[in-house]
Image (cartoon, rainbow, N blue to C red):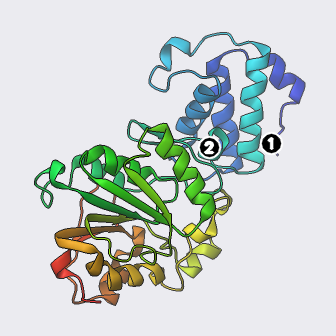
Amino acid sequence: MTSHPSQHEVRTTLRTVRDLVRFAASRFEEAGLRYGHGTDNAFDEAVYLVLRTLHLPLDRLEPFFDARLLPSEIESVLAVLERRVRDRVPAAYLLHEAWMGDYRFYVDERVLVPRSHIAALVQQGLTEWIDDAQAVSAALDLCTGSGCLAVLMALAYPSAKVDATDISDDALAVAWRNVEDYGLQDRIDLLRSDLFAALHGRRYDLIVSNPPYVTAASMERLPPEYRHEPALALAAGDDGLDVVRRILAEARAYLHPGGVLVVEVGSGRLAVEQAFPTLPFTWLETGADDAGVFLLEREQLPAS
């Protein structure tokens, strides 16, 4: 049976960043925490939470590893670690931030923690299908959540006006904060919309979406960390394709000729291919086995 140190022992023994990282990693392993909201193991999670709570740079651990800390600093870190273990709150919600490459976004429990594989594809430019980034005049992010993909599209396609939709007013409030943080209020239009419902008459060169795609069975098995996220942003019916079906049925009408649709379905690739055996999906390489991101050109999509 594991014997936990008393609070007094913890507070009088831990003195350095190294001490806190070691203590956190041990506690995380013992508690059997689940990851996937920015890190994938106990050590990286410990480093991230300790450094960010202490307002230290994430890319320079070594110079600070043996730095002695003030009692107030140790108390602040321990409070964050306790919530991570006791309440199983994802690190992104504890720190109110998520990173997509070099880009930081504000998040809280009103939105899914950003982790879409589409982000890297947008930053790389989708050059096989989009020859000239300057030629993209209009882009759409369906189910925008925190607004991160809309921001990244605005940065990747500097001539584009970007629409970003979500059915959740709470999500749009978070997205607006991120749009403001990047000074993109004049280029990103946030709209409350059930997919395309509020977009009548609009057309786009590029539509991306990281929609809900978790099956009913998987929703029942979600670990506690994932239950902090809004179910509206995850659940998509028995086979996880309730929202994807609607996107595929309607997207063609909202694309310019030659436009492209990019959708993430996670581990649902097989389900998508079985449900739509005649569609010529291009599955994009992201470096992750379960990324499940497909692309279809407008002319490949079914007419609505």
Q: Position of residue 177 (x, y in %)?
A: 55, 45
Mark earlier in primary sequence (2, 1): 1
Eye-nearest disc, 2 or 1? 2
Q: Nearer the viewer, residue 46 or 276?
A: 276
Q: Which residue is mark 2?
A: 91
Is there CB contact under 8 Å for labels 2 and 1? no
Residue drawn at x 59%, y 66% as measured from the top left: 168
Q: Is residue 252 above or below residue 96?
A: below
Q: Which residue is mark 1?
A: 2
Q: Position of residue 255 (x, y in %)?
A: 25, 73
Kindly tell me whether residue 274 is visible in this rendering: yes
Position of 7 with respect to 278 (left or right) is: right
Position of 198 with respect to 264 (left or right) is: right
Q: Give the crowd class for mark 2: few <14, some 14-19, many >=20 residues within 10 Å.
A: many
Q: How many marks?
A: 2
Kind of residue indicated by mark 1: Thr
Residue drawn at x 39%, y 70% as measured from the top left: 265
Residue drawn at x 26%, y 80% as measured from the top left: 252
